[in-house]
């Protein structure tokens, strides 16, 4: 086949109204000015204390913060049950499942025979927030919290969380626990014992 | 020897400087940031503050000024030093001078002294504006040439062709108005717009649209900012400028915006006149202030109305700037020579025919 010029149909067929140019400019101006007035009105209402009426989505981080939805995977934490003890039984499944191998557990045993983690170490500098630990945990003992602020530190050593730093009261994590139960076990609106 | 005329002129010059350089240049810098932000569903600059008071971002202009004063004034190697320094001056001075013939109020008699609120009441004020604004082209072209930079040179080239083309069209758009008002003096043109039905925009709204687009092109603002064209030419003709020299180009752009708005107000929107209120009627309504007080009050109202119309047109220019994308260079030329120029010629013929036929009664 001989080399020829390929004509690209750029799909631009303007109507006479569009080719007159001025009406389309006025239409564009109408759109931008509509945004302008709506946003200005929203900012005025915000100054009067009606933040919810604002159409601008911008969140000014240090002053304003968002609460992430329960599906958000923040820093993994250990669940402290209502009786004050950790739910973890030191089975070591999370340790195995963890792709970057950031979890280290040494198990122990209480007088009544319950197993519990003597030490639980989670290296926040290596954690990739994948949520496998949470998925693999048979006791809902480690879950991804909504914590996302100020996780930075000046050194890697300071990002290694020990057991005490990881323990979170269960009532703060109930939404996430409900979510993962319905997601991983297919139990919707799970109302099991705490 | 200090005569009342000297004081009057000095006061008017100080007022014009305060209005353009002191008020509009920094405030337009703020408006440009803030209006664009709000139009684009953002919040915009609001961080600069003193003791926590940010005044909705107004202090950013101040912070910018302080930053730019202390910036290094850089001249690139191989640049034409003298011209490189002269170019920003040649851009900013014409912008300021052109405002001299724009009347920002009417004529008033204060304590037996006649005050005409225009810095220079020239009989050929309209020509003066065109003559002076065409000088600002040199500033841009010289800046592009003296910088020893490819982008600057291309920007200067584009500016020279663009500004020349649009000056032709811009000059032709006002000829219809000159025929209508039978005067080249801006003061006289404004005085003839006392009756609302004699405002330029009533009969000559096509000329207004053409003049306004030409003026924006003349000021090299979006959508006609091919000489600057950040995405193509870095910053165009002022790529190599920093510090206060850069501020001069920046200020020249804003002052020219004010001058364009002032020209449009004087030619099309009746200057300081309020619709359906005559000067005599205004003075009568303010009669309670006494003869001198009424004149002072009328003067303040006139200047206020002028500034209000100025702000409206500036807001319109800002809205256009943040609505439209940049034209391609050939589109600019096509629009200038093939559309605006014939349209303005057509409008001149139409106006002439209408005046001859007696359809368009002249003031």
Image: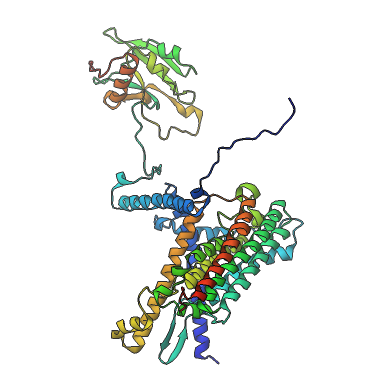
Q: Is residue B11 above or below residue A123?
A: below
Percent x, y for residue B353?
Answer: 53, 72
Callout count: 0
Q: Is residue B44 visible?
A: no
Residue pictured at 39% horizontal, 13% vertical: A136
Instruction: Tell me how the rendering is colored.
Output: rainbow
Residue B52 spot, x, y in % from top left: 39, 55
B190 or B93, which lies in front? B190
The residue most toward the front is B357
Q: Position of residue A193 (x, y in %)?
A: 22, 16
Question: Above or below — where is B169 with respect to A61?
Answer: below
For residue A15, above or below residue A73: below
Q: Quadrant of the N terminus of chain B?
A: bottom right
Q: Is residue B296 visible?
A: yes
Could you tell whether B166 is left or right of B200 in the image?
A: right
Which of the image's four quarters has the C terminus of chain B?
bottom left
The residue depicted at 27 percent of the width and 20 percent of the height is A81
Indicate left or right for B133 with B29 as reference. right
For the residue pair A57 and A8, the one nearer the viewer reads as A8
- Which residue is farthest top? A113
Q: Residue at x 35, y 51 (%)?
A: A43
Q: Position of residue B328 (x, y in %)?
A: 61, 49
Q: Relative to the observer, which residue lies in front, B147 or B223?
A: B223
Which corner quadrant of the image does residue B172 belong to?
bottom right
Camera-side residue: B178 or A172? Answer: B178
């Amino acid at each position: 086949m001989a080399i020829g010029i390929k004509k690209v149909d750029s799909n631009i067929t303007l109507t006479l109204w569009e080719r007159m140019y001025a009406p389309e400019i006025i239409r564009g101006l109408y759109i931008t000015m509509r945004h302008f007035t709506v946003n200005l009105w929203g900012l005025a209402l915000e100054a009067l204390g009606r933040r919810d009426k604002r159409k601008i989505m911008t969140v000014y981080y240090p002053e304003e913060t968002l609460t992430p939805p329960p599906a958000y995977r923040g820093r993994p934490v250990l669940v402290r049950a209502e009786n004050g003890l950790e739910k973890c039984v030191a089975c070591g499944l999370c340790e195995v499942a963890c792709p970057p191998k950031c979890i280290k557990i040494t198990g122990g045993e209480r007088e009544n025979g319950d197993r519990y983690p003597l030490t639980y170490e989670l290296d926040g500098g290596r954690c990739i927030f994948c949520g496998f630990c949470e998925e693999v945990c048979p006791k809902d003992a480690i879950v991804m919290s909504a914590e996302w602020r100020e996780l930075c530190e000046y050194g890697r050593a300071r990002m290694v969380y020990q057991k005490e730093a990881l323990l979170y009261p269960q009532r703060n994590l109930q939404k996430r626990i409900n979510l993962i139960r319905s997601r991983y076990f297919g139990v919707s609106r799970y109302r099991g014992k705490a | 020897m200090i005569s009342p005329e000297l004081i009057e002129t000095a006061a008017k010059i100080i007022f014009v400087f305060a209005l353009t350089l002191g008020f509009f240049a920094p405030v337009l810098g703020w408006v440009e940031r803030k209006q664009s932000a709000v139009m684009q569903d953002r919040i915009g600059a609001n961080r600069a503050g003193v003791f926590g008071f940010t005044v909705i971002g107004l202090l950013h202009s101040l912070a910018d000024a302080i930053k730019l004063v202390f910036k290094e004034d850089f001249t690139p190697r191989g640049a034409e030093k003298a011209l490189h320094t002269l170019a920003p001056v040649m851009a900013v001075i014409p912008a300021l001078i052109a405002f001299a013939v724009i009347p920002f109020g009417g004529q008033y008699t204060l304590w037996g002294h006649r005050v005409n609120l225009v810095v220079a009441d020239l009989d050929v004020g309209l020509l003066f504006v065109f003559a002076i604004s065409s000088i600002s082209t040199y500033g841009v072209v010289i800046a592009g040439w003296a910088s020893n930079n490819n982008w600057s040179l291309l920007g200067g080239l584009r500016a020279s062709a663009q500004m020349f083309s649009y000056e032709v069209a811009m000059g032709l758009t006002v000829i219809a108005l000159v025929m209508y008002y039978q005067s080249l003096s801006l003061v006289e043109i404004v005085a003839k717009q006392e009756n609302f039905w004699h405002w330029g925009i009533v009969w000559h709204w096509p000329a207004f649209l053409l003049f306004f687009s030409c003026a924006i092109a003349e000021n090299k603002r979006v959508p006609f900012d091919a000489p600057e064209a950040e995405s193509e030419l870095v910053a165009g003709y002022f790529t190599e400028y920093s510090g206060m020299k850069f501020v001069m180009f920046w200020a020249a752009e804003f002052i020219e915006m004010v001058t364009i708005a002032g020209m449009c107000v004087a030619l099309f929107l009746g200057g300081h006149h309020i619709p359906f209120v005559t000067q005599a009627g205004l003075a009568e309504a303010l009669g309670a202030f006494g003869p001198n007080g009424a004149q002072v009050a009328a003067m303040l109202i006139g200047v206020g109305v002028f500034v209000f119309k100025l702000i409206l047109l500036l807001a319109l220019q800002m809205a256009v700037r943040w609505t439209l994308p940049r034209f391609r260079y050939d589109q600019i030329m096509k629009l200038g020579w093939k559309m605006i120029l014939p349209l303005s010629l057509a409008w001149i013929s139409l106006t002439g025919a209408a005046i001859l036929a007696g359809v368009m009664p002249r003031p």
